[in-house]
Image (spheres, helix red, strand yellow):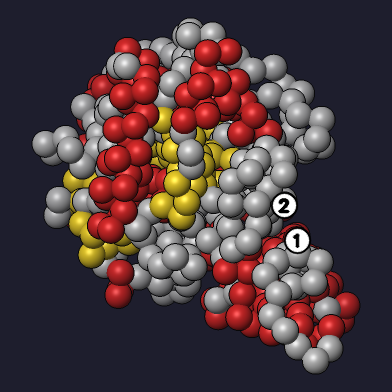
Amino acid sequence: MDFERARIEDVETRVKSAVERAKEKQEELNAVVSFVDVDSQLADLANKDPHAPLYGMPIVLKDNVNMKGVRTTASSRILDNYIPVYDAHISEKLKEAGAIVIAKSSMDELGMGGTNKNAYTGKVNNPWDTMRISGGSSGGSAVLVASGVVPFAIGTDTGDSVRKPAAYNGIIGMKPTYGRISRYGIIPYASSLDHVGYFTTAIEDAAVALEVLAGRDDRDMTSSYEPVPNYASDINSDIKGKKIAILDNVQEAITNAEIKENFDALMKKLQARGAIVEHVRFDDKLMRAMLPVYYIIANAEATANHSNLDGIRFGMREDGASVEEVMINSRTKGLCPYVRKRFVIGSYSLFEENQEKIFRKAQKVRRLIVEELKKALAGYDIVIASASGMIAPKSEDSQDEHLSKDVLVAENYMVMGNFSGYPSMSMPTGFVEGMPIGINMTAKPFAEQTLFNIGKAIEEETGLKGNDVEVDA
């Protein structure tokens, strides 16, 4: 299911059938928080150019993206009554491009998690095997694309929250350069790490989507003035002479032989196409520091960003005998234990006596990690590794904190794309035990075209364009 097919089908039929499929799969996948009325959006298409890039395409927004008049909860009970009075910048851009939003998708509560098990509406299930997790925090969007409900869905990525679910679900997950897409109107998690990302099943579609979403927005002062290229028309899968660096720390940490064999076979195919494939190694201490540094910085920023969710200024209110009791009761009942734990970690690192020895130190280590990535990319077009060392875990076996030595590196390294802000993309490369597996690529700032070009070569080699659960794999 790709963008071109979406364009040539009857628009109303296409949109209504997508809604029906989403509803039919809801009990199985539990991926939707709210369905969005499509009739008024279809009527508005009369004022749109039929040649608009996403004309009449059914899409999904992660439930932390504001859409005027549509409940937006970030999958948290405390925001159960929040109805935005304005559109996020990307909501505006998508409407201008002719897209039809059919649903708001489930996520880990406030974006905090990598399993999509702690959403207020319950866990999201992987369409390839509903006993397994979708990955998070953008799991709802990922499974709605992977199950063929929509060809495109918005996610956000603060650690690997688009790229890991993409790998677990066998689709493309794109996180562009920090500032490439405005975050205005998106409920934040950690401001220095948050990126808008998205899911598709074809490289060309990923390129078209970035053309639609990218560009300067004065309401988000972190958004970039960098011109937006014609990504789709500039795709070139001739990778002869492209320099690809395998991140050895990750590949050595993977114990699944089939995943390693799939990766090695792909590298040989890229070499056969003329790519120069070599190896790089990061400092092992920095690789193991990535997850702890992420937790300190992300949770500190989240604590500050969500201080307004107190039941008084904002959010669902629980009664109490005093203002302080109202706040305690509202946050206790409105936030799940996992999120409350993260706020405790964030608050602790922001205590005045702890800032220098915890928060500032984490920021310094982050800078060292970014310098390590910058140094690696100085001589290469991309750094590449398996997106995960495992297939999507079964729900009862999954956990967010991967702290064993090998898993610590293999399952958490993609956060370097958030620390640095560099563009990063995951895509499928095959199957193990009937479940999809994939790779992740990271490139220099604003080198999204490089990711699309090499990604197109990989797509041609794997034959997984348009991959979803309806495909006979």
Question: Disc 1 residue type?
Answer: Asn
Asked whether the residues under the numbered discs 1 and 2 touch, taking CB atoms below 8 Å apart as contact, a structural biologist would say: yes
Write down the quadrant of residue 7 in the picture.
Answer: top left
Residue designated by label 2? 191
In the rendered structure, the answer to whether residue 155 lies left or right of residue 253 reads: right
Residue 374 visible in this rendered orientation of the protein: no
What is the crowding at mark 1: few (fewer than 14 residues within 10 Å), some, or many (at least 20)?
some
Nearer to the camera, 186 or 268? 186
* CA–CA distance in space, label 1 to label 2: 8 Å
Residue 165 visible in this rendered orientation of the protein: yes
Q: Compared to 238, does 209 lie above or below?
A: below
What is the crowding at mark 2: few (fewer than 14 residues within 10 Å), some, or many (at least 20)?
some
Residue at x 57% of width, y 69% of height: 77
For mark 2, give the secondary structure: loop
Residue 233's tag is: none
Residue at x 26% of width, y 48% of height: 24
Give the image location of residue 206, x and y in percent: 45, 27
Q: Compared to 370, does 151 lie above or below?
A: above
Residue pushed farthest right? Answer: 352
Residue pushed farthest left? Answer: 472
Q: Compared to 354, does 110 lie above or below?
A: above
